[in-house]
Amino acid sequence: MDQQLTFADSEFSNKRRQTRKEKFLGRMDKLIPWARLEAVIEPHYPKAGNGRRPYPLSTMLRIHCMQQWYNLSDPAMEDALYEIASMRLFARLSLDKAIPDHTTILNFRHLLERHGLARQVFEEVNQWLSEAGVLLKEGSLVDATIIEAPSSTKNKTGERDPEMRQTKKGNQWHFGMKAHIGVDARTGITHSFTTTAANEHDLNQADQLLHGEEAFIFADAGYRGAEKRDELKHYQADWHIAEQPGRLKALKRRPRINKVRIQTEYLKASIRAKVEHPFRIIKCQFGFVKARYRGLKKNDCKLAMLFALANVVRVDQMLRARG
């Protein structure tokens, strides 16, 4: 839908140099299958005639995506639409017409949470990638990352989030949740994920991270013994699990004798490295290093959108690498 630009927006669009934000939003605008994602949400989206006329679904979905990319709260997203022309144009808005306020932005997020639509968006993105021949499902890499949650009790309830837990990693304690992911071994695209409290053992979620078509599975030392578990025995795949750090350290004390085994561990690590790509994108690029909401359900909804958008960014990276 073409939007008539205000004088300020028109002057902005005619300037010569494009910022990194403009270039990124331009690539996402062309790459994301908007029609397919809107079709997932449209049956649940408010229709005109029932109270105040709703903003176009395409506008609200684009605003929600920008919230994930730039880790913005609802009020901060509203401010950005007024202040940043490139974000306003991406959302197909202009200053001479109404801009969605933070309550409207919050209500759209609640709509996705209420109907589990973020998970459906994640699945639709992966279906689109499968049809395009990008998501191949030859092998899987599995891993988990801890996402910190606020540990302060200075809130209305006077207590920490009851659904979050603390766990020890190395010599450090962490309070929050875990994102467990299954990643395509060739592309580094996330095909499945689960959200749990931080004290959940990685092995307990392994069955939820596999699609069943794998020829091989790579995992770190936290998944040792996976192939012996009852729920994982039926997978006809070769398991390649890293040695315990202490065991690897012992092997390195006698490098000549253990040369082949050490090289095998380095090879496993190099293949397994792709599982870190989605974590790098959502944490370093999108800035999601701490849980924004209370409760696992709300955070699972946010992670579904983050991993869906991270998959699109990963495809964008591969396209740009090819030149």
Image: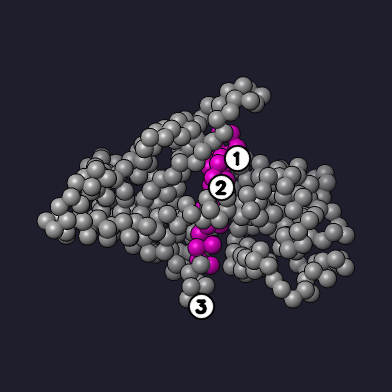
Residue highlighted by disc 1 = 292
Q: Give the residue at the far left of this rendering.
A: 257
Q: Residue at image x 48%, y 69%?
A: 318
Q: Give the residue at the far bottom of this rendering.
A: 323
User: Which numbered disc, 2 or 3, marks the residue that appears first in the sequence?
Assistant: 2
Q: Are marks 2 and 1 in contact (CB under 8 Å)?
A: yes
Q: Which residues are magenta?
A: 288-316
Q: Residue at image x 51%, y 56%?
A: 281
Residue 214 is a magenta residue: no
Residue highlighted by disc 3 = 323
Q: Residue at image x 19%, y 46%?
A: 250
Residue highlighted by disc 2 = 288
Residue 295 is a magenta residue: yes
Q: Give the residue at the far front of this rendering.
A: 253
- Quarter occupied by the N terminus: bottom right
Q: Is residue 177 toward the left or the right of residue 269 in the image? A: right
Rate crowding at label 2 as few (under 14), some (14 to 19) or many (20 or more) other CA atoms within 10 Å.
many
How far apart are the alpha carbons under marks 2 and 1? Answer: 8 Å
